[in-house]
Image (cartoon, rainbow, N blue to C red):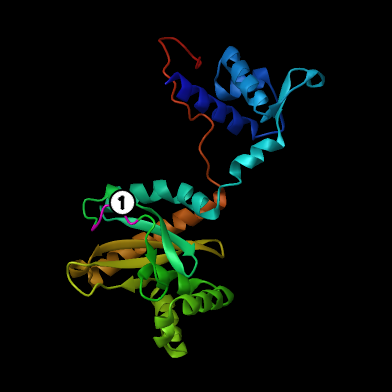
Amino acid sequence: MAVIQSVRRAFMVLRAMNERPVWSLQELAQRTGLAKSTLHRTLAALQQEHYVRSHEGMYGHYELTSAVTELSKGVVQQSRLVDVAAPILISTTKRIKWPLSVATVNGSDLRVDFCTMPYSPYAIRPSSYGRRYGLFDSALGRAYFSFCDRDERRILFDLRRAQHQDDGQLTPSDLRYLIRQTRKQGYGVRRGNRDSESSALAVPIFAGDYLLGALAYSTFSRTLNDSVVSRFVPILQETARRIGEGWLAGERPPVGGLDCPLSAGATRCE
């Protein structure tokens, strides 16, 4: 546990130092709530790894180095979307009980980056994470394809046609109808062929005018009727709106995210 706490303290300090260019030890102690002795050890470790610098000419002040930018090089848009969407989807599923999933474009398909099936008592499978869904035969794909801009739509269509020859059955007229119908109703839908199969509703996720991905609600085919659509589409749209707002706000974990055990009367983490 001590090792884990030290790592958490290091990230707390990095998040705090990201708020402005230069910090004194006293200022960091006040901002993070860490004891100066603990903070000094943490800063020394970060200096050794070249994430923080301090030298005689800085008179006891500290600043981040450009090395911290390397920590985010492996983070792609999908990762950030999951960071924003996951807590919103989990809280929504706990309220409505049905599973939700968020997906983004991956090649010529939509790929599920996060789902709440583990949190739902009515999930048809343990998880849909990593599952791929077609552009034209899934609720997620229809929602994304119908609401993306014309240039992206052409790219996706060409990719899909090159990779899936069976999609040649879709005529331009079919596609225009699919897009027009989906945009008119505001959501994509897929109905299973059998009662035991799943059906889904999906809406686009926008951050301003930028299309991030699609959000889906899944249920059993036998339960998907007009009443269910009328009830859950507004929930999906509101959930997608919250995700988009969170994306634009650049939500991130709070600096004071360290749950350190304090002894009676103590005011700082040691």
Whether residue 24 appears in magenta in the rendering, the answer is no
Task: Relative to 181, say whether 103 is above or below.
Answer: above
Place residue 18 in its image quadrant. top right
Residue nearer the viewer, 16 or 169: 169
Please give the name of the residue rendered at 23% of the width and 58% of the height, measured from the top-left corner. Answer: 124
In this rendering, does residue 246 appear at all?
Answer: no
The foreground one among 73 and 187 is 73
Element at label 1: helix
The answer to whether residue 166 shows anywhere in this view is yes
Secondary structure of the magenta portion, mostly? Answer: loop
Please say whether residue 126 is one of the residues in the magenta stretch.
yes
Start-end of magenta stretch:
124-128
Image location of residue 79, percent across then percent down: 50, 50
Q: Position of residue 149 (x, y in %)?
A: 55, 74
Q: Residue at x 48, y 63 (%)?
A: 106
Question: Disc 1 designates what residue?
Answer: 93
Q: Residue flagged by tag 1: what amino acid is it?
A: Thr
Left or right for 152, reference 95: right
